[in-house]
Image (cartoon, rainbow, N blue to C red):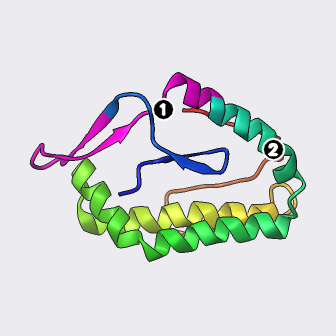
């Protein structure tokens, strides 16, 4: 499993303590993910600030294409992601695979469409019975660290 962070166009390992990831059913550790050190968080924020002007100039069709590639990748790797999610959270595999993975891919497809849509006109491709609602709002957001 890839656990590195993308900072400034490079994949780097976290330099802080590793956080264990556990199997919800057995309690066994299934992975350890190194966290970012404070300096790495700072570097990531600075890299995002530096990259923002170029991204802001990126044509909507190119932004949409990148987001669609992410959605396609999620679809392609859905089983592996669902298995990890099921093990980590205890969620039934069928729910992770058939509910969660399509919804995650749909978020990227929604925003790919939103890239090319006037404000408020993008619609989700989630089924009408889905308990989700998405809308668009035009506002510049430079970066987010959680």
- In the image, residue 18 lies at what x, y percent? 33, 34
Q: Are marks 2 and 1 in contact (CB under 8 Å)?
A: no
Q: Which residue is mark 2?
A: 52
- Whether residue 18 is in magenta: the answer is no
23 in relation to 100, above or below: above
Q: Which residue is mark 1?
A: 36
At a point 29% along the width and 58% down the height, the residue shown is 84
Tell me the SS state at disc 1: loop
Q: Is 18 displayed left or right of 49 in the figure? A: left
Quadrant the C terminus occupies: top right
Give the residue at the far left of this rendering.
26
| Towards the viewer: 109 or 36 | 36
For the magenta stretch, what is the residue range?
Answer: 19-42
- Would you say residue 96 is visible in this rendering? no
12 in relation to 57, above or below: above
32 in relation to 109, above or below: above
Numbered marks: total: 2
Q: Is 101 displayed left or right of 49 in the figure? A: left
Mark 2 or mark 1: which comes first in sequence?
1
At a point 45% along the width and 42% down the height, the residue shown is 13
Give me the C-alpha separation between circle 2 and circle 1: 21 Å
In terms of image quadrants, where is residue 92? bottom left
């Amino acid at each position: 499993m890839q656990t590195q962070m993308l900072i400034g166009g490079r994949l780097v390992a976290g330099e802080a303590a590793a956080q264990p990831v556990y199997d919800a059913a057995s309690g066994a550790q299934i992975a350890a993910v190194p966290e970012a050190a404070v300096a790495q968080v700072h570097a990531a924020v600075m890299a995002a600030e530096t990259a923002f002007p170029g991204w802001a100039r990126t044509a909507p069709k190119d932004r949409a294409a990148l987001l669609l590639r992410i959605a396609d990748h999620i679809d392609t790797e859905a089983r592996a992601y669902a298995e990890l999610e099921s093990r980590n959270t205890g969620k039934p595999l069928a729910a992770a695979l058939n509910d969660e993975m399509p919804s995650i891919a749909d978020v990227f497809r929604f925003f790919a469409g939103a890239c090319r849509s006037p404000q408020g006109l993008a619609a989700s491709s989630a089924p009408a019975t889905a308990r989700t609602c998405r809308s668009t709002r035009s506002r510049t957001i430079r970066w987010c660290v959680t």
